[in-house]
Image: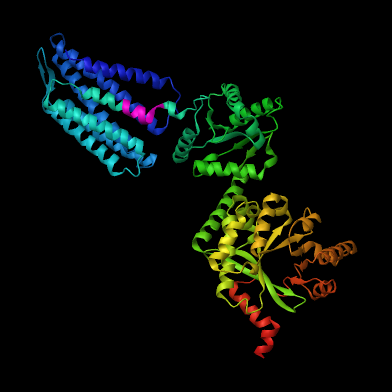
Amino acid sequence: MNIQIQLCGLFMLALLFIFYKSTKTLHLYKEKIFYRAMCIIIISLCLDILSLVSIFYRTHFPRLFVNFVCKAYLVTLIWGALTALIYSSADLFTRKKHQRIAHYLHILALFQSIVTLLLPIHIFSSQKKTYTYGLSVNCVYFFVFLYILATLFSAIGFAKIINPRRAFAVILWMFIWLSSAVVQFFNNDLLIVGYASALGILILFVIMENPEGNLDRHLGCFNSYALTLYINELLEHGGTFHILEHSLRSPHASEENNTNYDSWNRHILRLLSSYKDILVFQNLQTGLVLISSNADVLREAGQKLLNHFSLLESFGSQVSLTLVENANSFSSMNDIYDFLSFVHASHPDAAGNLFVADQNTIAKYKEQHVIQQEISNALADDRVEVFFQPIYSNRDKCFTSAEALVRIRKKDGTLLSPSIFIPVAEKTGIILELGERVIEKVCLLLKNSDAIKLGIHYIEINLSVIQCEKRDLAKRLISIVEKYDIAPGLINLEITETASISARTILLENMKTLINYGFTFSLDDFGKGESNLMYIVEMPVSIVKLDYDMLKAFFRSPKAKTVVQAVVNMAHNMNLKMVAEGIETEEEIQGMSKENIDYIQGYYYSCPVPQNDFLEFLRNNQPVLSSSAE
């Protein structure tokens, strides 16, 4: 009785089964298919051994029983091959569609199983050889061969879609199984098909389905890779679930306590061990993510952690707990990560508290996401435009400059309000690309139009706070003007007081480089927010632009008027030029002229207009050009 090979395969799978069941799994869809395949192959090996035993002792059993056991083993081969096909094709379809296809395949396999059970089978047994043959066996060989070909086709033909490691494992299994089937078909005494099936399961386990691969080795909870797999499956399945994120907000804590994170998180895991309906995952950084279908359970767990944290001086004030209700409203794990980043940025004071991100918070994030996507699309489709607001020189009695203002044209032709997209661009970092696009378009205007001939000395361009904090700012701006062969003196860069506060050393280094190259700078919105006269002293600017609100107060408040007069006198004594922004009436024009303001900017002369309208404005309103036309 030749059952040594089958026993080896069965012993190998038994150990694999014990190891698999003793390790935590997420019960993902593909994990379930693999587990089903492993169980089928184990049953197949058991029936293979039982069939050989029953054949060997067939004189002690009814012939009907012996035939049934032999055919039952053959049926398991059909189902094993079918499961391999289902497993290999799981990446090709959505879960619902794949389940529907698998349902039809199960009906087909059931029909094939009935055919196998009904067809005749014959037994050959001698002292050296024991095997079965006949129509039943031949049909099974045919059915299994078709399934193997279909599996190889799905793994090879759709290699770009299927997980490459899964495809490799399945292909290797199928070739081993196919080779063993061919060998056994021509050498009936070599009963190796069952063992080849066991090898296939071992290959899948080692390459793809080892549950240890989804666990964090230090903490024992599920890792961030498993988190992505689990979230994506939940989103695809369509069920309701909620997330509680635990993280440490303080960047200094990350440096000082990095070695304590694992022990800290293990302590948290012990606190959460009593919650059986909560799954805990290691986050991409150092925090944890808790997932449950019950928001109240997560809220209770979060409050428990918060109460515990409050007793710990080193971590209590740094801990951030964010409860995301109905997380199934997001599209992917990356979308959830972006949302959590949005929450952290929008609520920096939430550390030490349990912040509940309800539907209103999610709606605000999605609104920002839509705007962010609109900005990205506008950049890709070249729908970013630059409007220009002329600036009048009181000394030259004409328009000598203009401020460049970014606008986004939507696909329907309307404009997206700057008050909507600029804050989003600054929060998401797209302002960097947006800012450079504005500089390029200004360079194109100066290079390809007659703006300079029309009296324009320079164009003012706003620099965002984020741009000012970049060490390569000077290098990037210089490369742009060199690309378009524009004299740097034609561009005046506006910085704000907030920009000068943040990363002042980096900003000053960039300003020094750019000024040496030929650029000039303006200090925008002076008098707004955290105004400080030291900004004018420290920043190497040549122009100061008074804030809109301060200028409006000039005409209402004697104190404000005194402040403006003092600032103008001080600036002129420092050889700085002054610009009055937001001038709208004749009274304001006269008032600013009396105070010897150098430049006037506002709706009194023109609102921000598109490039062509700006050039037309200059042609119609520059005194020299107008008199020449007459």
Q: Nearer the viewer, residue 432 or 505?
A: 505
Q: Nearer the viewer, residue 459 or 380?
A: 459
Q: Residue placed farthest to the top in the image?
A: 60
Magenta stretch prevailing secondary structure: helix
Q: Give the side of residue 490 with respect to residue 581, left or right.
A: left
Tag count: 0
Residue 357 % position (x, y)? 62, 40
Q: Nearer the viewer, residue 102 or 548?
A: 548
- For residue 383, above or below residue 330: below
Residue 532 seen from this side:
no
Q: Nearer the viewer, residue 340 or 484?
A: 484
Residue 521 % position (x, y)? 70, 62
327 in the magenta segment: no
Residue 428 % position (x, y)? 59, 50
Residue 194 seen from this side:
yes
Q: Give the side of residue 21 with respect to residue 106, left or right.
A: right
**Residue 157: quadrant of the picture:** top left
Q: Residue at x 49, y 45 (%)?
A: 331
Residue 19 % position (x, y)? 39, 20
Q: Residue at x 61, y 28 (%)?
A: 301
The C terminus: image quadrant: bottom right
Where are the magenta residues, as a range?
A: 202-210
Q: Residue placed farthest to the right in the image?
A: 558
Q: Residue placed farthest to the front in the image?
A: 516
